Image (tube, rainbow, N blue to C red):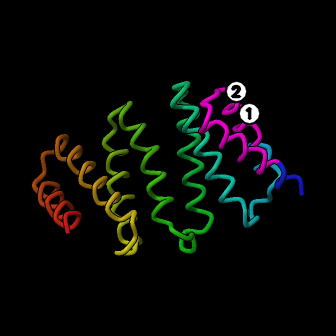
Amino acid sequence: ERHVYAFNLAHALKRRYELSHSLNDLERCVRVYDEALELLPPSHPERATCLRSLAWSLSCRFDRSHSLDDLERSIRLHREVLELDPTGLPEKYLHLFSLKCVLKRRYDLFHSLDDLEQCVSLLKEGLELCPADSPYRINLLEDLGLTLGERLARTNTVCDFKERIRVYTEASK
């Protein structure tokens, strides 16, 4: 099927971009992931993988171009990945973290408390789903502590202070 070849090409371009940081590779990568996505029906089992890869590529392009369209589209695609199969995604906590990362970029630009609240919620949900023995758990805890610290600086609520201490206590175990 053509979508497989397009996806494989886009993935190869993504890997080459990671090594070379060539904007041409990244631009082509985005175009080819878009093509692969157009070839996939909405119910195709590989759709989430393609969406996630395109979202990553768009966030990388945002880092280079600062195009808000890329950032907004990356956020929408990450949400779409989670909506495709809200309960059955393997390692869903990593998908939640990816969405949190792009929302945090938008928060850093516009300082919207709503974006910050979504980041906290996504991290909390991710921690609920992350196994206690996962090597990613400490990263989620640390990031939640930092995000709670940012929210504490904005809202000055005692609850954030207490929760931040609880999160850092768990992380230190």
Residue 100 in percent (x, y) is at: 42, 50
Residue at left offset 80%, top offset 56%: 40
Query: Left or right: 73 with respect to 16?
Result: left
Task: Give the magenta part as a residue range.
Answer: 6-32
- Residue at (55% x, 71% y) in the render: 90
Crowding near the residue tagged with mark 2, few <14, some 14–19, many ≥20 C-alpha atoms within 10 Å: few
Residue 5 location in percent, x, y?
84, 51
Left or right side of 4 for 25 = left
> At 19% across and 60% down in the image, what residue appears?
168
Task: Find the distance from the CA under tag 2 to the CA under tag 1.
Answer: 6 Å
> Among all residues in the image, which is located at the extreme top?
65
Q: Quadrant of the N terminus?
A: bottom right
Quick one: label 1, few (<14), some, or many (20+) residues within 10 Å? some
- Which label belongs to residue 112? none
Outermost residue, left side: 158
Q: Are marks 2 and 1 in contact (CB under 8 Å)?
A: yes
Foreground of the two, 48 or 57: 57
Q: Residue at x 80, y 43 (%)?
A: 35
- Residue 24 falls inside the magenta stretch: yes
Q: Tell me the tag on residue 28.
A: 1
**Secondary structure of residue under mark 2:** helix
The residue pinned by badge 2 equals: 24
- In the depicted view, which residue is nearer to us: 41 or 9? 9
Callout 1: helix, strand or loop? helix
Amino acid marked by disc 2? Asn
